[in-house]
Image (cartoon, rainbow, N blue to C red):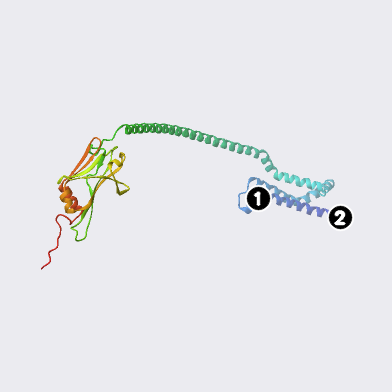
Amino acid sequence: MAEHGTSEGLLAAFDKSVLTLFEVVALLFALPFGEDLYHSTPATEEHWHYLYVGLGFAVAGPLVSYIFRQASSRLSSTIRAASENFYVWLVLILLIFVYGIGSDLYWHVTTTPLEAQKTTLVGWLRQAQQGRDHALTTVVEIEQLKQERDQLKQQLAAAQSQLQDYQRQLSAAQQAAHTSTAPPPPEDQIPISWQPDFQFNWYGTQKPDAGPRMAWIRFNGHATALAHIKDAYIISSLTGHKEQLDVANPANFSDKWNFDQIEPITTGAQVTLIHEWQPPLLVAEFLSQWGAFEFHVVYDAKEYVKSYSQNDVGDKIAREMPGVVGPRVTKKPADK
């Protein structure tokens, strides 16, 4: 009786453990499907298969006890011994695990490398296509650069040719400038061009002097060629009186030289001839003696003569000495 009670207790414990195991396995297989339901995503065909297997384990769990009771005692003892063996459970768990991941493992082993190869091949093909396109673009750019280079070479050659033409024209113009001579100045301006007007200096006096006095007269010119002045003078057209002219020092007009004291005058030099009256003449005396005169310059082979009429002299004095000569405003005589 004791053995029978012990057997019944072991059988009850075995039934519970087997039921628990089957239910756990059922939950494991149903877990992917439940996860799809939780995330509100459509269940895949593979997850439906897991659900069916889980349902099979859930249904088979309660039937195990009945099957054991209907089987022979030897089969029951064998199964019971197997259920109590750690290695049997380990193998069973491994089989379940392999079954669960077998399809995925098979897909990864058989399909993924091929897809990876396809992906790699497609990537290589795309890279090759991009490389070819880049190479074609580079070739086109190189051709464009070559064309631009050729155009620049042509433009440079044209610019160099134009520059050479300009240089030749410039050289020809310079040669023409050196060989050609400017129009000669008028004969009366060689070798010295004299200004057409003369200059004079006067100063006012105080009573009992009769009026302003004329201090000096001078003539300015510049040399247009090498000049050698032998003589220069002024001669009155009214009295025939002649006065000698001297060369004024350009740095100090009060310093005067005779013509035999100077070197030949070089081209471009300024020349000033001057005469000072000693003593200075009253304006009335100047007009009576020098109201008309001639200016003479004697060179080696020619003589320059410039005549000034009474109108020329009178107009100049009227312009530069207003109110001294000619019409002017006067004061009434005092009443007696």
* Amino acid found under the numbered disc labelled 1: Phe
Q: Where is mark 2, residue-wise?
A: 6
Residue 33 - label: 1
Distance from Cα at disc 2 to Cα at disc 1: 42 Å
Label 2: element kind: helix
Q: Nearer the viewer, residue 180 or 78?
A: 180
- Local crowd at mark 1 within 10 Å, few (<14), some, or many (≥20)? many
* Point 73% across, 44% down: residue: 98
In the figure, residue 231 lies in which quadrant?
top left
Specify whether residue 1 is in view. Answer: no
Judge depth for marks 2 and 1 and give the one in front: 1
Label 1: element kind: helix
* Point 76% across, 47% down: residue: 93
Q: Nearer the viewer, residue 216 or 182?
A: 216
Residue 130 pos. (x, y %):
54, 37
Q: Nearer the viewer, residue 225 or 275?
A: 275
Residue 202 pos. (x, y %):
23, 54
Q: Earlier in the sequence, mark 2 or mark 1?
A: 2
Residue 303 - label: none
Outermost residue to the left: 336
As drawn, is 329 to the left or to the right of 132? left
In the figure, residue 155 lies in which quadrant?
top left
Residue 314 pos. (x, y %):
16, 50
* Amino acid found under the numbered disc labelled 2: Thr
* Point 49% across, 35% down: residue: 141
Q: Is residue 143 above or below residue 66?
A: above
Residue 175 pos. (x, y %):
34, 32
